């Protein structure tokens, strides 16, 4: 799965985790610098994970014949679109606003931000493929449900890749960004 989509599977370099040792994840909620903007940003990450899981689960239900074709098509269209549109918008915001703010506060972590931006480029390719295969699937469901199953298998593969990508990327992104925010008291 990863070979086809060029998804980073290696963890963030240890040098990018220096502040995480000072501000471990389980201490974030209690930190006085942990403000609403950061909580909302993390909440978006929770939503992305859930949407990715939902698209995969719905696809599996269709493949297992536990979900009717029209019902699956409606869910794929709605949740798949929400996942793709929101991820694109979120990453655009991060690349053009959020990451430059973090870099200005602490340039020691620019290498980590570059890794995350490269992840965004790779994810754009996966999302593009997901959109293509989901759109083909929706057309096939309207024309010939039997032929749609081959396309749905590709939706499943791509949605699983999105889930795996998000698991690695979002965790690294959170563990790089939030300690910088807390350390420098940003986003208050």
Image (cartoon, rainbow, N blue to C red):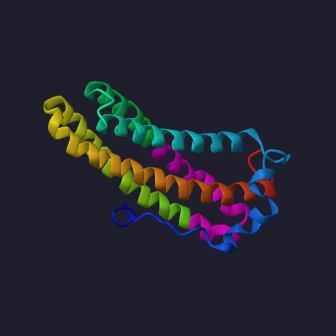
Spot occupied by residue 2 in the image (x, y as percentages of width and height): 40, 63
Determine whether, in the image, residue 72 is placed left or right of residue 18.
Answer: left
Give whichever of 96, 70 is nearer the camera.
70
Give whichever of 41, 159 is nearer the camera.
159
Q: Main secondary structure of the magenta part?
A: helix
Spot occupied by residue 156 in the image (x, y as percentages of width and height): 34, 46
Q: Within the image, what quadrant is residue 131 found in?
A: top left
Determine whether, in the image, residue 160 is placed left or right of residue 117.
Answer: left
Is residue 95 something one can see in this rendering? no
Is residue 41 something one can see in this rendering? yes
Residue 12 within the magenta-colored segment of the rendering: no
Query: What span is colored magenta in the figure?
Result: 86-114
So how many labels did they put on this image? Answer: 0
Give whichever of 112, 30 is nearer the camera.
30
Spot occupied by residue 186 in the image (x, y as percentages of width and height): 76, 51
| 104 to 158, vertically: above or below | below
């Amino acid at each position: 799965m990863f070979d086809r989509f060029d998804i980073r599977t290696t963890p963030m370099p240890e040098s990018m985790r220096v502040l995480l040792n000072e501000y471990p994840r389980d201490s974030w909620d209690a930190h006085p610098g942990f403000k609403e903007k950061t909580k909302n940003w993390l909440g978006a990450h929770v939503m992305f994970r859930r949407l990715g899981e939902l698209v995969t689960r719905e696809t599996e239900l269709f493949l297992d014949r536990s979900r009717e074709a029209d019902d699956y098509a409606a869910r794929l269209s709605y949740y798949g679109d929400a996942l793709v549109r929101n991820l694109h918008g979120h990453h655009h915001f991060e690349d053009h606003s959020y990451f430059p703010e973090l870099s200005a506060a602490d340039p020691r972590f620019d290498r980590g931000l570059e890794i995350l931006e490269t992840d965004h480029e790779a994810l754009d390719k996966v999302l593009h493929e997901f959109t293509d295969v989901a759109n083909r699937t929706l057309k096939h469901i309207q024309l010939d449900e039997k032929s749609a199953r081959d396309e749905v298998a590709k939706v499943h593969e791509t949605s699983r890749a999105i889930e795996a990508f998000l698991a690695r990327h979002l965790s690294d992104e959170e563990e790089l960004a939030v300690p910088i925010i807390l350390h420098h008291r940003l986003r208050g």
